[in-house]
Each structure stands twice: as structure tokens, then as C-alpha cells.
Amino acid sequence: MATGRTHRPATRSRGIPEATVARLPLYLRALTALSERSVPTVSSEELAAAAGVNSAKLRKDFSYLGSYGTRGVGYDVEYLVYQISRELGLTQDWPVAIVGIGNLGAALANYGGFASRGFRVAALIDADPAMAGTPVAGIAVQHTDDLDRIISDNGVSIGVITTPPGAAQQVCDRLVAAGVTSILNFAPTVLSVPDGVDVRKVDLSIELQILAFHEQRKAGEEAAAEGVALEDPDEEAPPMRATPANRKGPDGDMPAVMPA
Amino acid sequence: MATGRTHRPATRSRGIPEATVARLPLYLRALTALSERSVPTVSSEELAAAAGVNSAKLRKDFSYLGSYGTRGVGYDVEYLVYQISRELGLTQDWPVAIVGIGNLGAALANYGGFASRGFRVAALIDADPAMAGTPVAGIAVQHTDDLDRIISDNGVSIGVITTPPGAAQQVCDRLVAAGVTSILNFAPTVLSVPDGVDVRKVDLSIELQILAFHEQRKAGEEAAAEGVALEDPDEEAPPMRATPANRKGPDGDMPAVMPA
DNA sequence: CGTTGTGAAGATCTTCACAGCT
DNA sequence: AGCTGTGAAGATCTTCACAACG
């Protein structure tokens, strides 16, 4: 059975820290914008501002790639674009397959920013036979039965999963069996994959929950600032099963009102 | 002018580390699944496996919330569900507005997992007058002109931006001016917001680029393992402007073939 | 000069390993 | 006996601050 490795153990990716890798696309985007405006060089300060990070971090990040700047001057925009693209592997073309052509899958297929950077939607796959043949974003949807063949025929190594959560693991297994080694998962499920396969997840619901946490905290701070004693006036009845005598909640603990 | 703070300076969020907050939704999802199967208690080991993390991390995470487990037994599922929900602020309802009802915006509006956890799509907003009134996912799209009123009338504090990149910053500014303090940004742009406003971004293209990086690395390792001398046979002509004599690339450096 | 590149310090996050409780 | 909760060690990431250099 596959161990649910989701985030790569501790492999130092050819020396470049993961956190840096995650920011390279950001720099690349900012640099591309500068390139389009024919700006020849840029300082770490300017570029950092454009990418929304601080300049020390940016310089440190670039230092892992090599010495690509000129002291007293800055970085050559075109040169950096090329170096980062190469580092990210964007000088080659990556055929991508999207599995699960519902609302989201279709939206992604239509997403322009896709092709812009070396990625090409090579195949759309769905389990619904009724969809087979239907063109979405100019590409005919193919049936799941042919998944294996589609993946190998197109040399797909990156798969995007936009199926309902129940189907995600199964689709994932089939993709991996067919040779896919990188998966972008939009289904709200934890995927189990063998070692050597990378999974990244995008989860709307999780992002919103994180925002809600901070949002709540802001509201709480406001109240505290106003000198309001924090005390939920009449909270929802909290479910309790095992009722231990001495819970150690950090502050709020359980609401005072408890169900029988 | 707003300083481009994107990721919250260093505010220790009521003592709970940001990394922990980011995992709470994962735990909550796993716990909800257990709850639906009427599982009464769960050990850190089991729950960790279901959430795709290791058990030490999970226990440490929970320790920031308080002592909610029972030694020798595990955690009471219902009780934990409640505590985490409360911690994340999901015991209350969060009205959300989606701005930019294109393919992606519509897909999100239709996304079910949305409402499941305290989030409610309160409004859909688009700049296209032709869309005004059109129902998407059962909700009539409203025009951007009324953004201010819509946000205040519905008490929206969380906004989702799914506009084209060019419009994102402007929409963001208007949302913030109207009172929104949390933004989920799907547009491939760095947003500048005043302090006190949280921004989280979801960027398909960035995720793919990160995968491509690792994918490339795998390919390189394979080649290395086979004893193949790594040498791009005929790479794209690399753009060079300022041609410095002594570049210090970590390995590959520039391709041997250089344009005049 | 002005700006990069980087050791070193600091902050945050992860993992270990075991004492402490049920 | 079994599992949680946690100090401490280790790993990773960020920031500082300044020497090195064009």
C-alpha cells in the first residue's frame, strides 16, 4: 500500500530550498511584466516590491541560483527571465491532462494563463460517457476508460484532478499507474501516492477557513480593544460526548451553558 | 499608498502558529468524515494518517488549542470537531462575495463544498452590464457599480476575486474600501492592501511551475542515474543583454551555443 | 557611490523521545 | 498497557547588516 506522502520528505531539491522554489514563479511573473515594458535592468528592491516580498529574501533566493546580478546596478531582466525559466523547467513544454471536466475542470481548461508558461492542455478526461467527444475549450473530452492510453500517447507527466472527492484517489492511482509523477489536486481529499510522485493541492475551502480564523481574531481584538468582556452571549449548544472534568482550554474553553 | 503586505507581518495569532492554523481545516475535514461514520474516538495516529500528516505534528498542533485528548484513549471526535470549528470561527456564518463571474467565478459559485462549512455565497458581482440579473448557481449577478452597497448590505467581510489580472487591484481596493478585511485572490497579481487586511492567493500557474521544477529534477536524476552526461543537445537560444564575463551558475550555467 | 551576495542571528516549524496520565 | 502532551533538538526559513564589488 502506498504511504500517504504528500509533501516530499526532506529532499533538498538540488540545493534550492523549497520556499525559494515556491517564490521563483512570482519573480518570473514580475520579471516578465518588466520585460514586456522593455525595462532592461531592475534592482532587488524594485523587483521585490513588484513581487510582494522583501528585498533581502529576494537576494537570498537568487543567491541559490547563482550570481546573476551586477553590484551597483541590479539584475538584467531578460537574463534573469531566462535563468529562472530554465531553473523551473519552463524552457520545455509540459503536456498536462485534466481529469474531471465539471465546472472547475472546464474553467481550468479555458484558463489562459495556462499555456502562457510552457504548459499545454493535452487532454481532457471525464467519466461521463455523455461528455465524450464534447469539445471544451476547443479540446474534445475523452473517456476515463482510455486514461492509460491518453497519458502515454501524449507523454503527460503532470495531471490535474478536478473530480468529485470520492473519485479523486482512484483517478490518482490510475494516473500514477499510467506514468504521471506530478499531480495538482483540486479535490478536497488527501491523496496517497507512492514515493517519487509529487502532489500539490489547491483547496478553496481550506483557504476560506484560514481567512475566517484571522477574521474572527480581528473581531475579537476589536471587542477586546473596546473593553468588552468576551463572553459569547448565547452560543450554539456544543456537542459533548465524553465529558472530562478538567479541560484546559487556552481561554474561551467551553461556553457556560451546557446541555444535559 | 498601501504597502504591499501580503502575508501578515509576524503577528502570533493568539498564540496559535500560522502553520498550525493552516492544518486545522485538514483535521476538521478528517474528523467530519469520522463523525459521519459515527466513530466516537480517534487516536492521534489514526487521525494523522487520515489528514496526511505525522502524528507528532498533529499532537503538537492540538496542544496549542488546549488539552482536548484523553491519554490512553485518544480524542473524542465530536468534541474535537466542535473545538476546531470554534477555533476557526466556523460556528458563525460568513457571507462571501465573489467578484468576477467568468468561468472560474461561476465554477466557484457552483462549488458545493463552499456552503458546507459556514460559508455562504452572499453575492456575485461582475463588471459586465450584460450579466447583471443573470442567475448563476441560483444567485442573480449584480453590477460592480453597486459593489459598495452590496458589501455593506450583506455584511460581507470576505471577498473572492476571480477577475482578470488587470482588474484585480482595483476591485481589491473597492472591496477594502467597502469594509472587506479578508481576500482570496485567484487573479495572478500581487495585491497591495493596507495593514489589517489578509490576502491569500490561489494561483494555478504557480502550482504548475513548482511541479514542473520537481518534475525536471526527477528527469535530471534519472539521466544522472543512467550515467548520461547531462548536456542539452540543442537548447533554445538563450536571451542575453548584458554579457558579464564571469557568471557563477551552480552547474548548467549558460548553454554553450551563444547568439552573436 | 549604489547594489549585490552572504555569513550570522533570529524566528518559525518539525521531529524526537519520553514523562505523565488514564 | 496505551496514548497524549511537551520539552528539547534539529531543520528550515527569514531577516539583519555589512563586506565585497562594479
Image (spheres, coloured by chain):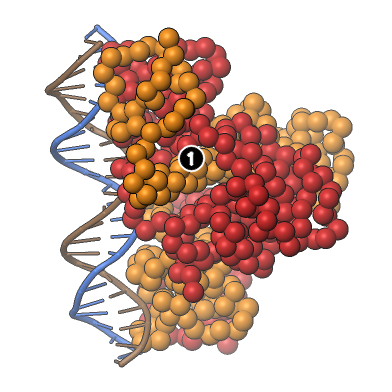
Chain colours: A orange, B red, C brown, D blue
Position of residue A56 measured from the top left corner of the image (x, y, whole percent): 34, 69
Position of residue B108 measured from the top left corner of the image (x, y, whole percent): 68, 44
Asked if residue B256 is positioned above or below residue B244 in the image, the reply reads above
Q: Residue A62's image quarter?
A: bottom left
Chain designation of label 1: A
Asked if residue B79 is positioned above or below residue A183 in the image, the reply reads above
Question: Which structural element holds mark 1?
Answer: loop
**One can see residue A155 in this view:** no
Q: Residue at x 54, y 73 (%)?
A: A31
- Taking the image as shown, residue D21 lies to the left or right of residue A119, namely left
Count of labels in the image: 1
- Depth check: give the residue in front, B18 or B183: B183
Quadrant of the snapshot with the C terminus of chain A: top left
Q: Residue A203's image quarter?
A: top right
- Depth check: give the residue in front, A60 or A206: A206
Q: Residue at x 37, y 49 (%)?
A: A226
How many residues crowd mark 1 within 10 Å: few (<14), some (14–19), many (20+)? Answer: few
Position of residue A16 measured from the top left corner of the image (x, y, whole percent): 39, 58
- Taking the image as shown, residue B224 lies to the left or right of residue B160, namely left
**One can see residue A229 in this view:** yes
Q: Residue at x 57, y 32 (%)?
A: B117
Q: Residue at x 36, y 43 (%)?
A: A228
The residue to which callout 1 is attached is A196
- Taking the image as shown, residue A148 lies to the left or right of residue A24, namely right
- Depth check: give the residue in front, B59 or B110: B110
- Depth check: give the residue in front, A126 or B192: B192
Amino acid type, callout 1: Gly
